Amino acid sequence: MPPLPSPAVPPAEDSLPLVFLTAGDPAGIGPEVLVAAWRLPGAHRRARLRACVAPDTLRQAAGVAADGLVVVAADDPRPSSPERILVVDPGDRDAVPRGVATAAGGRAAVAALETAYGAVRRAEDAGRRAALVTGPLHKGALHAAGHDVPGHTEWLARACGMADDAASMMLWLPADAATGRGALGVVHVTLHESLRQAVAGISAERIVAAGERLAALLAALLGRAPRLAVAALNPHAGEDGLFGDDEARVIAPAVARLRAAGIDAAGPLPADTLFLRAAAGAFDGVVAQYHDQGHIPVKLLGMHRAVNITLGLPLVRTSVAHGTAFDIVGTGRADPASFLAAIDAAVRLADAGWRGGREAHGRSGKRLGT
């Protein structure tokens, strides 16, 4: 999936979706990858970009000259371009040391997120297509700033008036022309919690909800019904009960419910071979049972092009799949590929009218495309 290809017939500027970008924690590489992505012309052909970052952060952390920034209102209609960064100023003025986790960095990250989230919701209320793309956070900095949330996903769920577990994280790997690998999506049943808590929290209901959200998202990205696989929890998928009964007792009934709902789902399948099969093209998406079961293989397959997409919320939100990378701040080694891919995925989803999967299995009970 090439990033943001130019359409055959360029759309009218006022028809392009508004995409609001944050840099995450300004102490990390977020400002650098945001600016590097902004300066590529492809990022502006299908969207009007807005950076929700303090201007001083872009000047000091990413070397943007004063005349390379223009502060605008969130609803400013002008198109974006590589030459100047259009900034929606979140108003945070605290100095943030680079390369370390601090309360100042956590406060700045949340101020930018609040600004961007509010801008997206207001744009949608006004009938415009909009999306949110976020840079990497540092959870220690968030907590130092007094924010008791594990990350973006849970913060956004609470902002939408929902429970933390109402949202799921999906990792999206765009197709890779260099290796010939197809695209792959991975959603997690449980997320930011200890392994002990995650295993205790796995239920058929949560597996079904994750599978439904993944199916709706992949249908929007791929333009067809996806093929899903559901990972087992135990080694060898429990080995007929020798290594645990979670597969027979919880996971297999959930897979049966997904299939009864019209979703092409297989499983439970042993996780140690499942991702090899998925990478070879056997499946479009995988339902992983816990954080590392999904994250480790995705990052091995393509960490720098992976995208984090939030499912279950009434808005489009994508993010980079990497962290703040304090160790390479200011070295010029930060790779903007994941940020570019996150913009591309956000535009595709906004163009498809996707809203976090809630339009797929919301109050009406109808699925996407039915």
Image (cartoon, rainbow, N blue to C red):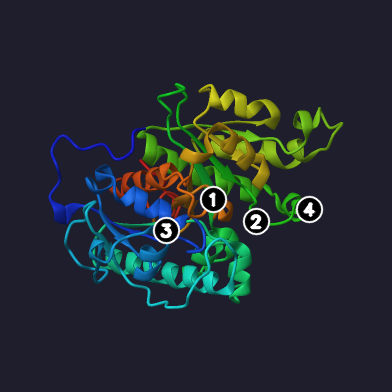
Give the residue pinned by disc 2.
192
Asked whether 101 or 110 is in front, the reply is 101
Question: Where is mark 1, residue-wise?
Answer: 328
Element carrying mark 2: loop
Q: Are marks 1 and 4 in contact (CB under 8 Å)?
A: no
In this view, the mark in front (1 or 2): 1
Task: Choose top left, top right, bottom left or bottom right for residue 234.
Answer: top right
Q: Position of residue 102 (x, y in %)?
A: 59, 70
Nearer the observer, disc 1 or disc 4? 1
Distance in Å between CA atoms under marks 3 and 4: 35 Å
Numbered badge on residue 31? 3
Front label number (3 vs 4) = 3
Q: Amino acid at mark 2?
A: His
Lower position in the chain sequence, tag 1 or tag 2: 2
> Which numbered disc, 3 or 1, marks the residue closer to the eye?
1
Say what amino acid the circle numbered 1 marks: Ile
